[in-house]
Every structure is written in C-alpha cells, then in structure tokens.
Image: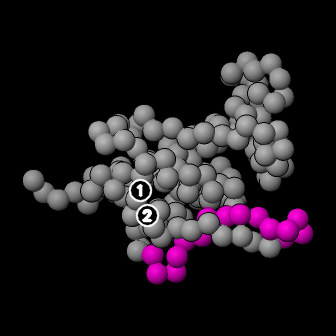
Amino acid sequence: MTIKELAREAREWIALDMRPNEMGGADFARIARDAPDWVAHMYGWVLANHRIYDDQASLYLLGALDALAEQSDGEDPEDVQVTGDVYTEDLTRWLATHPARTEYVDIALQDYHVKTIFDALGVGQQLEREAVLDLVRDWLRTYAFEHAEPA
C-alpha cells in the first residue's frame, strides 16, 4: 500500500469529536473503538512522539492524514503540505492551549526572523503542524515498507 492509501484508510477510523469544557467544548480527533490495531498504534505513536500530547495535536494528526490522503496521484508524499490558521483569534487560542507551544513561537522568532507577533504565532503554529505531518508521514512510510508485498 502507498502512503496515500494508508492515510485514506486510517482517516476512515478517526473522527472529529467534541469534549465538553467550561468554554462550551473542545474539538479533538477520536479513534474508533473497532479501528484496526495498526491505526490505533499509529495514532498513539504519533501523539506520544509529538512534543505536546493534547486535543490540538490530535486535530493536527487528522489534518495530516487528510493532506496525505488527498495528495495528487504521483505526488511525492514529501511534497505534501499542511496550512495553518490565519485569524488572530484562532492563533492565540492555539497558543493558549498548552504552555509548550511558546517554544514554537520562540523558534519562529529566532530562526525565521519574523517581525510581528502575529507572524510569529502563524509560523509557530505552522511549525507544529509540519512536525505532526512529518511524524504521520514517517510512521506510514515505515508501515508501508514493513508490510509491502514481496515482488
């Protein structure tokens, strides 16, 4: 199976859900109870190997699967990209969800020489989304290699 095919199959077993909280609710990606073991393992491995294990990271995992599943035929999975939020409210909400997210903003300020806080938030969030995409892509690539049919 290709990374695209695996991403499509995994995506069928992971759904968007809402967890009630004091603000009305928080979205997260939930894995189906009857999902195949490999999907559950991928989900757990990606979140465990990401710097921040929370609902937001689970949504980025879902976005990464969507991006990989929707890639054009013949497109190299390495060329697949994810996009971040553009509205200040969404970016500040992202930052507020976990204190460790300031590390991504710090990297944006230091390594990308952004000039405004808005740009730092946008680049920081993009860095996190790309980190999750890299983890998903790496896991799926390894799985595809290990489960390839002999030629």
Please, is residue 144 above or below residue 133 in the view? below
> The residue under label 2 is which amino acid type?
Ala
Asked whether residue 99 appears in the rendered view, the answer is no
> The residue under label 1 is which amino acid type?
Ala
Residue that label 1 marks: 7
Determine which quarter of the picture holds residue 59. bottom right
Looking at the rendered image, the quarter that the N terminus falls into is: bottom left
Please, is residue 26 above or below residue 145 in the view? below
Determine which quarter of the picture holds residue 117. top right
Determine which quarter of the picture holds residue 57. bottom right
Query: Residue at point 69% right, 56% down?
Result: 56
Dot 2 alpha-carbon crowd within 10 angstroms: few under 14, some 14 to 19, many 20 or more: many
| Residue 106 colored in magenta in the image | no
Please, is residue 44 above or below residue 50 in the view? below
State the scheme by which the image is colored: one colour
Asked whether residue 115 appears in the rendered view, the answer is yes
Asked which secondary structure carries label 1, the reply is helix
Residue that label 2 marks: 10
Q: Position of residue 10 (x, y in %)?
A: 43, 63
Query: Residue at point 33% right, 56% down?
Result: 5
Q: Do the residues labelled 2 and 1 touch (CB within 8 Å)?
A: yes
Query: Residue at point 41% right, 36% down?
Result: 78
Q: Where is residue 81 in the image (x, y as percent from the top left)?
A: 51, 38
Query: Residue at point 60% right, 70% down?
Result: 30
Q: Which residues fall within the magenta stretch?
A: 21-35
What main secondary structure does the magenta stretch of the protein show?
loop
